[in-house]
Amino acid sequence: MCRHLAYLGPEEPLGRLLLEPPHSLYRQSWAPRRQRYGTVNADGFGVGWYAPDDPVPARYRRAGPIWADTSLTDLARVVRSGAVLAAVRDATSCDPDPEAAAAPYTGDRWLFSHNGAVKGWPDSMGGLAGSLPPVELLSLESRCDSALVWALLLNRLRAGMEDGKALADTVLEVASAAPGSRLNLLVTDGQTITATAWGDTLWYLTGPGGRVVVASEPYDDDPHWQEVADRTLLSATRTDVLLTPLKDPRDDMAPVPSEESRT
């Protein structure tokens, strides 16, 4: 599907996070080790980062594979940040503007990425799309499923909902409308990282100096990487990581065993 990564901590050159590790996001674009769906993430990439004293993130995206971008090496060598979100994409559907469909998406102070796919797209999401203000639908960056999921989440964030609740409510809403969807979502505001494991892999690594990385898969063989269980919400700051189970909406629809079947 896709691979993505978010980082909080001391300022680092982008290349040290995205290019240099032995199993970096760069390498995961053609040789992921833990990807469950798809094999090559060559349908675009993007990186977003925060500069000191500026709450609005910068962003660099391209439609092609990350390994084909001749400008990225120089950019990643000189740009430093203490808050980063990046992704490489394996598209599940065609898009008239593949660069616009590449994560990260932005809105106000947030960066967002979606690793997965909405089942039954676009028919399954018609009802949820209708719940958004018309101007937000008309402002979608892309016509892909990730863009609509982001619009649903951003609508909650702009209404003042706390990041973790907004992310959890969005995942549960989409999962209810489109059962079987894979919804590994990742969002940061430069101060926190919030993510869901819902149908694909998610890992995190903490380190000294208030360093935390949340990623689809480990970018090296450090034994301190921790796997996040499926159906889990992760909320991280530079000092803490909190994991909260999420309940699949389908559990509420499961038939109750009869007295006969219990005996």
Image (spheres, helix red, strand yellow):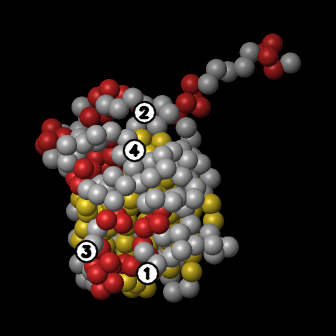
Q: Earlier in the sequence, mark 1 or mark 3?
A: 1
- The disc placed on residue 71 is 3
Residue named by callout 2: 119
Q: Count residues near mark 1 (Cα–Cα under 10 Å), then give few for <14, some for 14-19, many for 20+.
A: few
Q: Earlier in the sequence, mark 2 or mark 1?
A: 1
At 24% across and 50% down in the image, what residue appears? 98
Residue named by callout 1: 16
Cα separation, mark 2 vs mark 4, equals: 15 Å
Please state which amino acid type lies under the numbered disc 2: Lys
Q: Are marks 3 and 2 in contact (CB under 8 Å)?
A: no
Residue named by callout 4: 170
Cα separation, mark 2 vs mark 1, equals: 35 Å
Q: Earlier in the sequence, mark 2 or mark 4?
A: 2
**Quick check: can you spot residue 46?**
yes
Please state which amino acid type lies under the numbered disc 4: Thr
Q: Position of residue 252 (x, y in %)?
A: 57, 29
